[in-house]
Every structure is written in structure tokens, then in C-alpha cells.
Amino acid sequence: MGEEVKNLYVHFPFCRRKCAYCALHSRAGRGQEEMSRYCGAVARSIRALDPRARFSTVYFGGGSPGMCRLDGVFDAVRPRLAPDAEFTVELHPLDVTKERLSDLRQGGVNRISIGVQSFDDGVLSAMGRGYSFSQAERAVLEARSAFDNVGIDLIAGYPGAPEETDPCSRRIEGWDLRHVSVYSLMVEENSVLGKKAARGEVRIPGDAETMDRIAACSRFLRSLGFVRYEISNYAKPGYECRHNMAVWRGEDYTGIGEGAHGRMGLLRTENWWPLDPGVPGLRPPAAETVDPARDGTERAIFRLRTSEGIDARGRPGWMAALDRAEAEGLVSRKGTVYTLTERGMEVCDSVMSDLV
Ligand code: SF4
């Protein structure tokens, strides 16, 4: 591995408790000692990457990376940051304190993403997030006072979410955010919510209802000056997430840790460590080598999710499918570049499945 290591993702699987909608791998309610061992392995792993590697983007996701003491990890990352690197850390609202924000700044972090998820106290409680809306708001404002580049994540279509705050509330006008991600609720079979839904104990809003709410939120965010640069992501101009854009544009990214995915040449990795992490009980790593045709398709196709669109030049099969989608009003075309329309964004998966 050489200087091509530009985009680094590190997964921290620790959470206070399991959220009701979550089926991701996570380690809930663990002690500081276990987290420290994990962070030690992360720091050693980053040092084990090619010494010439320089990171243009670094993304610490979770889980809740903010629960961990990250000093040793920062010491490993900081010397390898490119001069204009984007360094994001996801934070749970309860992890946002003045001291923590100051540690992050010193660690080289310059972008904060806070998982607010809902503006409704009843929904936050049903989700098991462990904070109220006013605590989330305090966290966002605290983060904004320490960082310029702050964004939030929201979930649309949670059972019982009132229309006026699902997924967005006018309250964010005063937050002066740079980025908002809006995801529609995925009901995972193995989550607490999925089990309740299977027993008929909760009503899951229909797709059309959720899409209508996302469309209203999208209009509201545009009125505040946000640009929808990817199906689920809105940013003020110049504040698009560079790490995620690199992934959608088909660049390589190195993923370290339990729950991390990576793409390095033809290699796809999961739960990967560049050296034996020396921590017992971790999920086993998995790696797969894909053929060059699949590699090329994967790297090209995800651009369709973005406002940049995909170039169908040299791909006659794509051109025919995209022309059909254009006739249905799902994409618009400029030369050989196709971009999703607002309607197309709602059914992107089906447009993409016609291409592969
Ligand atoms: S949603 Fe995030 S914070 Fe909640 S359990 Fe899943 S990984 Fe942890």
C-alpha cells in the first residue's frame, strides 16, 4: 500500500445502548478499558500503513467514536493529514462537551457530524437515543461555537413522528448548519423496531408518506440555501462531504476496524486491520477480490446518486436503460451525462438495478 491511501475510514463500534431501529454491528455499554484496547489497535494500524500515505479525507464513524479516548489515534493520524484534509468525526449528542470539542480540534478534526435523528421527544425516546430534543439542540449549538463545519443526521418516517417535525423542524434555521443528511427509516428485521413491527405493535409509515415528508424537507432545506448533492445529503455550497464524495466518485478508501468496509484496487474488505490488531474477540476480517468489470461498474455507478450524475459514454447498455428512465422523468441528460431528477431520487435503487 503506498501513497494512494488518500481516504481513510475508521469504525468505532461502541455505543451507550442499542438504538431500537439499529441492526448494525455495535458493542453497547462497554467499559473504557475495552475501548482503549480497541483504540490502541486503531492507532497501531494507522501507523502500519505505508509511511508515504497522506490522507485527503479521514472519517471516524460509529457507533459513537466520541465515547472513546482518541488521543493516541489522533497522534497516529495527524502527521499524515494532507494540508487541506477534511477530517470528520461523528458525535452522539451526549458526547458533545466543550472539553471534547477542544480535544477534537487539537486532534486535527475540522468537520463534525451529529446524530440528532429526530426533533420529537417521543420519537427520540422510542428510538432509545437517550437524550431530549433540547439536549440535541444544545449539542449542535455547542459544536457550532467550536467548529465552522457542522452537520446533522436525521431519520424520516419513524413511527409516530409528527408531520411538522418529520424529518425536519424550522428550529434548524437558527443552527446555521453546513450539512444535513436525511435518511428514510429502514426497518431491519433484527432490530427491536423490526420485531415490534412484525408483531404488529407499531405502524410503519408507508413509502409514499415518508417520501412526501422528505420532499417537503428538501424544499425547506433548499429555501435555507442547501443544495441536494446526493440523494440523502444536503450541503451549503462548498461543504459537501469530501470523504463520501470520494467514495461515490469511485476512489479507493481504506477502512480500518470492526464494521469498516474498504475498497483498495480490486480488493473489498470488511472488519479489516492492516496488521494483527492483537485484541481478542474482534469480528473476523473478510476480503474479496472482484473482477475488473465489476470493479469498473461499482466505481462508476454510484455517481448516479450524486448531483454530478453518471457518464454513459462507452456503456451502450447503460445508455439504453438511462434513455428509458429519461422518458419516465427519472433522469435528465446533458450529452452523455445523466442525473437523477427529484422523482428519480425517490426510486434510485430501481434505476440503478436496471443498469447492472
Ligand atoms: S444507531 Fe448508531 S448509536 Fe445507535 S446502536 Fe446503532 S450504531 Fe449505535
Image (spheres, rainbow, N blue to C red):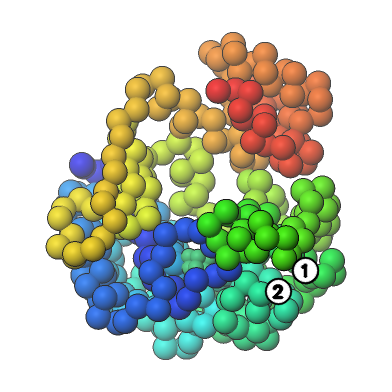
The image quadrant of residue 302 is: top right
Comes first in the chain, label 2 or label 1: 2
Question: Would residue 211 appear left or right of 279 to someone viewing this image?
Answer: right
Q: In this rendering, does residue 221 appear at all?
A: no
**Of the residues shown, which amino acid type is indicated by label 2?**
Val
User: 9 or 209: nearer the eye?
Assistant: 209
- Which residue is at the front of the view, 7 or 344? 344
Question: Which SS class for mark 2?
Answer: helix
Are there few (<14), some (14-19), or many (20+) residues within 10 Å of tag 2?
many
The answer to which of 98 and 42 lies nearer the viewer is 42
Residue 326 drawn above or below residue 158:
above
Whether residue 311 is situated above or below residue 238 in the rendered picture: above
Residue positioned 37% across, 53% down in the render: 260
Look at 47% across and 81% down and name the residue there: 95
Q: Tell me: 27 left or right of 301.
A: left
What crowding class fits label 1: few (fewer than 14 Cα within 10 Å), some (14-19), or many (20 or more)?
Answer: many
Residue 39, can we see it? yes
Q: Quadrant of the C terminus?
A: top right
In which image quadrant can residue 223 be found?
Answer: bottom right
Q: Which residue is mark 2?
A: 123
Is the Cβ of the residue at disc 2 closer than 8 Å to that at disc 1? yes
- Residue of label 1: 161
Left or right: where 20 falls relative to 3:
right
Q: Amino acid at mark 1?
A: Ala
Residue 66 lies in what quarter of the image? Answer: bottom left
Instruction: Indicate the position of residue 259 as horizontal and vertical percent values.
Output: 37, 55
Q: Disc 2 to disc 1, how far (Cα)?
A: 6 Å
